[in-house]
Image (cartoon, rainbow, N blue to C red):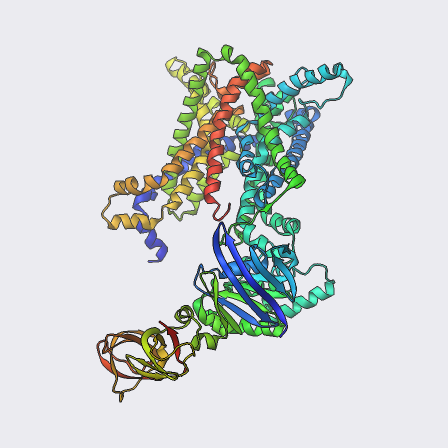
Amino acid sequence: MTFRKYSEVLHSKLNFNLSNFNLALVLLSLLFCIPVIVICGSLFFPAKEIWTHLFNTVLIDYVSNSFTLLIGVGFLSLILGIIPAWLITMYKFPMSRYLEWAVLLPMSMPAYIVAYSYTGAFDASGPVQEMIRGLTGWEYHDYWFPEVRSLGGATAMLSFVLYPYIYLLTRASFIEQSVCVLEVSRTLGCNYVDAFRRVALPIARPAIIVGLSLVLMETLADYGTVQYFGVSAFTTGIFRTWFGMDNSLAAAQLSALLLLFVAVFIFLERRSRTQLAFHHTSSRYSPLLKQKLKGTRAFFAFFVCFIPLLLGFIIPASFLFNWAIESYSEIFNKDFYLLLFNTLALAFITALLALAIALFLGYTNRNSYSFINRLLVRFIGIGYAIPGTVIAIGVLIPFAWFDNRLDDFLKIHFNISSGLLISGTLFILIFAYLVRFLAISINTVDAALSKIKPEMDEVAKTNGFSHIGIVKRIHIPIMRGSLLTALLLVFVDVLKELPATLILRPFNFNTLAVRTFELANEERLADAALPALAIVVAGIIPVIMISNSISKSRLGYE
Amino acid sequence: MNKAIEIRDLSLSIDGHSILNNISFCLGEIDIACLLGPSGCGKTSLLRCIAGFEIPERGEILIKGIIINNPNHYIPVEQRNIGMVFQDYVLFPHMSVSENIIFGLKNLQQKRIKQRLDELIELLDLDDQINKFPHQLSGGQQQRVALARAMAPRPGVLLLDEPFASLDIELREQLAHELRSILKQDGITTIMVTHNQLEAFAMADAIGVIKDGKLRQWDTAFNLYHMPKTPDVADFVGEGVFISGEVINNKEVKTDIGNIKGYIPDNLTKGEKVRVLIRPDDILHDDDSEITAVVISKVFRGAEFLYTLEMKNGLHVQSLIPSHHDHPINEPIGIKLEIDHLVIFAD
């Protein structure tokens, strides 16, 4: 008996019995892959006329706008992310200790909410331009002011809230490599700037690419911002084809095209993650001697790190806050409570389900050497990269088909109508959320489970504990924190989700995000502020958790 | 002697804790020195002061006669012309072996860079590795690359921080000898930090024993072992036990295991109570001896046993005895004293 087999035998009991559950795993992954399969499958149905039409009218616009967005957002968020990461890692300057986590705050802002806020503030009728006119006596056309509702505006909005991905990953890389590698480079004659250019930045490259891929995936997935700014991008195009042209095949095929772009970034991200392992420099950490900046340089460093925070959080949040105070008495009524309850309940149920599924998958795969099992779970995890719009369409097409067939069948044979049994209900919405967010709980639960070494189970067994006893006394205490994290992360993401909810929600069912969207599109920005602010406040929770876990993990860094 | 590096009255505190206290020493060109001491004694901090990563509060550091650090003057790390090999080598993971080695060779002609690279590759026997990346190398190979990288710019002083700590124990002594000959061939002045005295003995022309932030003795390996200046040094370097005695005259001291002759420092006068260091190699096994001691415990070391013996008066001493003399525990064996270097301190 080889060692591997031996250990499989040893651990087989507490992973559930693999042979029985493999089927469940396969079915589960198939279920969650339905949207992707449907979208990709749509390509097999010929639709030449639609494509000729799309190509002649809007397709070039979709592609070129989305492309411009990707380049602009990528470039801007690299600058906004990398420079503060380096300054905060290497130097001491006024407020640097607070900026370290504060520059993460824009993560709590969905891009569409920032877009509403900036539009309200900087549009021609907004307080800023009003003030300019008041001070100078100019009329509306007498001066130049950047147009918020434009492609450039969308680029800015997305960059302002997405750069923290790059900041987070780059800084983690700087911290990990910092001490020793940078010290070596200095003994070899590099000053701080050389060390950054020749050593820190190249070593951080895989981490930066991972961050950038995430930013670009989010950019492609965005619907709320481009829709509000009237920019024709892929996601708005899919919406228009679906609702406006009522052409589900074309919408699915457009989604497939979008998926192709996304796949490039998934590939980039995965490849860079594997490179990260080789870019590990040292297992030894010693406190980094931060250089203390003085005078203008200190002010400059502070300023450079403060700008992203200002743009991505302070400005939009303070306008929202102001409007929320104005509209508070009107908006904060019974309807708002219902809205809040609906949203929270929906988010909580989804988070709980995601956790349960992730636990099932985690235990099924625990210490399993089956390549197929691991592949299946990975496949389920891809949902996170897929835009909500695409998932919604990939979910709606098959379920609507099923509902219609069922309805036909029941009408013919039993003369009763089932109506839209699934596709008009919360079930389909929750299912779409699970497809999109399951990856978060899977990753969190997997990380937690990997902390429980098989030997721990064995020790407990030799101490006479039953399986239930082991779970109760060892697994739950070790995993408790991570399970809560998994729950919270999914909860907040559901709260913020817009496009899938817009497409799939039942009639007269609203969430905070949808209500914000509706009010903003009715140009009632002040009224949209309160639900928007509620989403932002919830969004701050994961930011706090992330910055906590960073400060715990940075050994020897201060 | 041309001084390659000189340290004068150097003191360092970090967060109000005194780490180093009045350290002074100097080192000649091409010499290899070891800073030896238990962990936490401050030896790595001293190395980091020389490199410039820590800023001492008092004292001076000079490299080749030029002040690189005193309270009014701090030359940044990158301008000090020092080389440093870190404890786990920290090669640049995104560069090949040859790129790593020539990293510090800026502002040089391409031809000169190539020349130096070839020299180091030959000296360190890295022929087959030059195109590999750090994660493809073994620990020993990584060490060589790190060493080549630090040596490449011909630093005024090369600093090695526990260079053997991440290698297998069996490899260490052999590598220490090899390293010594490489450094001597390339003519580089070196200061190495270690807590392992065998490594220090194998490498160094001079050894500084550091304890509690103070330099206790700066000397050759032989002198540290046979003529330690303080009980601390005697205790840390080599094995042995202290027994008490009394000075009889300026050549002889009386102890519980007999009278011992040897050089007695002038400050110890007749009748003074003293402590005498008995090394395991000072006590020989002799079946004919009248003095016997009982075996309490023994450690097998291959060629010899290290016996711990109990004398009649209850005193414990250690003895190194060739391993074909295998005595069971509790057996009395004959011993005799043969002390070439009397190590004696006032009690």
Q: Is residue A513 visible?
A: no
* Residue at x 56% of width, y 30% of height: A106
Q: Is residue A545 visible?
A: yes
Left or right: A212, with B201 as reference point: right
Towards the viewer: B113 or A375: B113
Tally the marks: 0
Quadrant where the C terminus of chain B is found in the figure = bottom left
Towards the viewer: B80 or A417: B80
Towards the viewer: A210 or B312: B312
Residue positioned most to the right: A142
Quadrant where the N terminus of chain B is found in the figure = bottom right
**Residue A226's spot in the image, x, y percent?**
62, 24
**Residue B150's spot in the image, x, y percent?**
60, 63
Towards the viewer: A18 or A84: A84
Left or right: A151, with B135 as reference point: right
Q: Which corner quadrant of the image does residue B212 belong to?
A: bottom left
Residue positioned most to the bottom: B288
B315 lies above or below B337: above
B245 lies above or below A304: below
Residue positioned most to the front: B270
Q: Which corner quadrant of the image does residue B112 belong to?
A: bottom right
Left or right: A470, with B207 as reference point: left
B191 lies above or below B45: below
**Residue B228's spot in the image, x, y percent?**
44, 74
